[in-house]
Amino acid sequence: MTNILILGMTEFFIVLFAVLAYMIKYKRRVEIIAGYDEKMVRDKSGLANFVGNNLIILAVSALLAFIFELLNPQTEFLAFLVFASVIVPIIGVGTFFGMRKYLVRPKGT
């Protein structure tokens, strides 16, 4: 039997990442990005697209984990664990380093 708590948390991540992706990529609400400083961004549109696309990847990967959890209830915890402790950090670190190309370089570097 599927664990309703794991399914609920996975659904929460699907909705969270999808809403954030929509707000950042299509509504250009880059100010909701953690650490955003308007003076340090040279390409606001590029930053919104990049971060929004990575959030879409996270939402889709959460959806795939959710489907896998439904189809394989014996390994649902493992699927959630892989998503939450492997996929999210990898995409997060990739986003952090990738978005540096949209920021203003400090003088002297």
Image (spheres, rainbow, N blue to C red):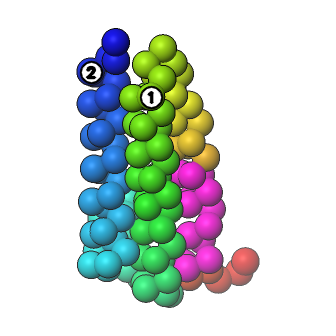
In this view, 1 is above or below 71: above
Residue drawn at x 26%, y 21% is 4
Choose the circle earlier in sequence order: 1 or 2.
Answer: 2
Horizontal side of 22 relative to 84 (left or right) equals: left
User: Within 10 Å of the Cα at label 2, are there few (<14), some (14-19), or many (20+) other Cα atoms?
Assistant: few
Q: Is residue 76 magenta?
A: no
Instruction: State the image quarter where residue 13 is shown.
Output: top left
Residue drawn at x 62%, y 62% is 97
* In-front residue for pair 43/7: 7
Give the alpha-carbon distance from disc 1 to disc 2, as whole Å: 14 Å
Secondary structure at numbered mark 1: helix
Residue type at mark 2: give it: Ile
Q: Name the residue under label 2.
A: 4
* In-front residue for pair 40/16: 16
Image location of residue 28, percent across then percent down: 31, 79
Residue type at mark 1: give it: Leu
Q: Give the range drawn in magenta.
A: 91-103
- Principal secondary structure, stretch drawn in magenta: helix
Residue 16 in sight:
yes
Horizontal side of 76 relative to 91 (left or right) equals: left
Q: Quadrant of the N terminus?
A: top left
Q: Mark 1 points at which residue?
A: 71
